[in-house]
Image (cartoon, rainbow, N blue to C red):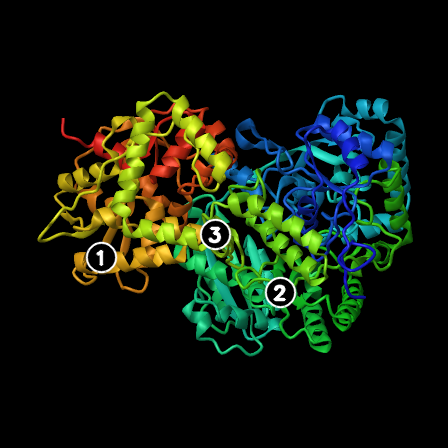
Amino acid sequence: MNRTDSRSGQPGSLPGADPGLVATLEAAVPGAVAARDTDRLAFAHDASHYLLVPRAVVTPRDASQLAGLLRTSAAHGLPLTFRSGGTSLSGQATGDGLLVDTRRHFRDIDLLDDGARVRVQPGATVRAVNARLARHGRKLGPDPASETACTIGGVVANNSSGMACGTEHNTYRTLESAVLVLPSGTVLDTGAPDADDRLKALEPEIHAGLLRLRDRVRGHPASVEAIRRLYSLKNTMGYGVNSFVDHTRPVDILTHLVIGSEGTLAFVAEATFRTVASHPHAATGLLTFPDLAAATGALPELVAAGFTTVELLDSTSLRVAQRSPQVTAQLRDLRVREHAALLVEYQEPTVERRDQRIADAKPLLTSLPLATDGSLSSDSDTRTALWHIRKGLYAAVAGARPSGTTALLEDIAVPVDRLLPTCRTLTGLFDSHGYTDGVIFGHARDGNIHFLLNENFDRPEQLRRYLAFTDELVDLVLGEGGTLKAEHGTGRMMAPYVRRQYGDELYDVMRETKRLLDPHGLLNPGIMLTDDDTVHISHLKSTPTVESEVDRCVECGYCEPVCPSQDLTTSPRRRIVLRREISRARTEGDTDLADRLERDYQYDALDTCAVDGLCRTACPVLIDTGDLTRRLRAEQRGRAEQVVWTSAARHWDGVTRAAAGALDLAHAVPDALPATATRAGRALLGDETVPAWTPDLPGGGTRRQPRPSAHPRAVYLPACLSTMFAPADDGPGVRDAFLALCDRAGIDVRVPGQIASLCCGTPWKSKGLASGYDTMRDRVLPAVRDATDGGALPVVVDATSCTEGFTLMLADEGIEVIDAVAFTDAQLLPLLPDARRVPSVVLHPTCSSTQLGLNPALERVASAAAHEIIVPDDWSCCAFAGDRGLLHPELTASATAAEASAVREHDATAHVSVNRTCELGMTRATGRPYRHVLELLEETTRPK
């Protein structure tokens, strides 16, 4: 068995979209159907190691459209699979029928009872929900490690748990009710007072069938005992048949059967959770033991001591962690032999409770047979370093895997007293099957361990190895009384083994449940239950070597929620997988397919990429997809374009003043003239060449001027944005505001004599114009060396993207680059007079301020000028991205839609950010005038 995805026939063949199918779907969900090869192949990939290409991708807008789609599915026999975050690992979010994207339009979050409950749609991420709950001291019970990207749809579909919640606060235990759309199209709110009566009236067969199955399970003592034993552990194998024991009314049984059903029984259009208290004060420690036996032997005492989390790391995990630059000195200096470690943490509601926990734990920690010091720390930097040891394992192993291999992250659970023999035998399986890089870690207090290994599914002998390993793993886990899936769901990976875990009787109950709720078998076929004993080794994903920038991508999807283009065109993950698909098509000789994909890729992936770098902040293996975009853009640049932009670098003073003059001229004539002119230019030369002028753009700014100083504290490089764009509302602009603040604080700064000709190089770098970038760098370096007295003085920059640009450009010069906001926070605020603070301000952080770690300083500066600081929960990169918002206004409109909606709900006194183009983007999106935060600070600290 070699090629593995769902394409049938000749190598590389991809059946085209069926026009009749597309027409049928369009009738059911108008404007929501995508069937290009690009769309189908991009969504064929998720975080699992399976790949099936859907016939079409459908993106319904609400539960009503979804119900219509399900009715169409039943009428035409069309199988469908629900996909939200695409972070599932077991293949449960892939299918070769219809793929239903439930992430884009199902993101509403409503807090109830001051956060004691929360009603959420399936496309909202766990992080987005918890961000809103945090203001009330609450959070969701489930705490999956993928919380930045996984969505509520997946949390419910997989019965998510996590590091701290155990089985007490998982999805099954904390979900109160749901709005379900059944395969027939029936919509049922299970939280309604008459929900059970409505189920009986609308779906009498389901109501009666659930009663019948409930009585069958309860009347079978062996089934009840098996349920008690298996569900005392974390267990996501098969359907949640514990629902038949735990609940009596059919509607409640149905609600809980849907939890963990992986989209095979119904669609969850809305879920209402009971939340749990959030305890923000933590103390963490890494307890290193001489061996695994000592570590697991300490578990009962540690659990009894009330530790919220107890994470296991085997000796291989510790060796991997030692290679990290962030490793603690204690672990770095340890000579790891057979050692194992437990990462423990207390989480408490108050500082006093936390400190008492630390004191109470000292005698226990002193008594343990530790190989190193086992103290607990509440210091945030220390705790971050300790958690990096655990959370960095995936990045370390997956990021260093051989190109072309797939990273497999798996999990099992066994009774805690069987953890030691299970880990020992599992390590033996790694050795006997040649998985030399396998690591074991996990949630020790729950007997739930994860293991990570790399595999190449393109090689038949490696596939046979994987199959043999899996068979022995199943024998091991079931022999220890465990479950084959603790957190990651059954999916395709463990579907052939569900009968072995549960036995014939409970397996038949599961079969009857599926037939009862989905009689045509159209919801996510092949998942959870299967007659195909090879489903777990079919449709396996190969990972071809394509590009050095992105070959280490594991397709986890963590990047997607932060990507500005996610709802308009594509995302970093899909940019990468499409490059893999283009390469595969070329390799297999399907040039027509490759050409079609490349044509779509131009706009979808290149033109609408903001190259903002936020994807890197979310990526576990630290990929910046912007690096790929910049290189591909560079490869497209012709000689003439390179020459023009290199000339611009040589004459930058004139270019920026010309741009300012053009904006002034545009405002001096009727709006129709510049709008028509740019529209014609874009039609003739292309959207990538001519910016779109709109009346909301400001006039031109003023030329940057030198400022000599004999004894400066810093060198100030005002951004060229202040030359091209006038300040908001006839204000002073950040350049004059910063200089005024410096004067007010008695701090002198120097502005170089050549300042009008200098730039951070971002306009050239983002477009892939290497020659122009080098030309500008060659101009900047000597000017800055001279101005900083050979690097003795720091450089201060007043636009965050330019701060990033100069940081990169001056990286090898030993010159410190500081953003003006950070400089103000550290140097100016203590010396400024008290501000006459405005009542409230809406603050828009930027992608650059986030990557620079500037946001805490930004909030402090804003707090000095305003009583209330409002940072919208849904803030994200505005995607104006220099000129990207002028070339493709639709990108900024899409990227800012959620934030703009939130901003309009606040009647704030002022609106601020830290970059002029971001201010333009947010002004356009919200209709509110945004300006630099330093302008507000300057205004509020002026002498009366």
Q: Which mark is residue 545?
A: 2
Q: Can residue 368 be seen in this view?
A: no
Q: Name the residue under label 3.
A: 617
Q: Where is residue 46 in the image (x, y as percent from the top left)?
A: 67, 51
Point out the tag, 3 or 1, that comes first from the N-terminus: 3
Choose between 332 and 554: the one closer to the eye: 554
Q: Where is residue 907 in the image (x, y as percent from the top left)?
A: 39, 22
The amino acid on which the numbered mark 2 sits, given as a three-letter code, is Thr
**Do the residues under discs 1 and 2 have CB atoms within 8 angstroms?**
no
Distance between the alpha carbons at the discs numbered 2 and 3: 24 Å
Q: Residue at x 79, y 61 (%)?
A: 537
Identify the image quadrant of the N terminus: bottom right
Q: Residue at x 74, y 35 (%)?
A: 267
- The image quadrant that residue 412 belongs to is bottom right
Identify the image quadrant of the C terminus: top left
Outermost residue, left side? 710
Choose between 490 and 504: the one closer to the eye: 490
Q: Which residue is drawn at 88% across and 38% down?
A: 520
Distance between the alpha carbons at the discs numbered 1 and 2: 41 Å
Q: Position of residue 581 (x, y in %)?
A: 66, 55
Label 1 environment density (alpha carbons within 10 Å; few <14, some 14–19, many ≥20): many
**Do the residues under discs 2 and 3 have CB atoms within 8 angstroms?**
no
- Above or below residue 646? Residue 280 is above
Q: Mark 1 points at which residue?
A: 784
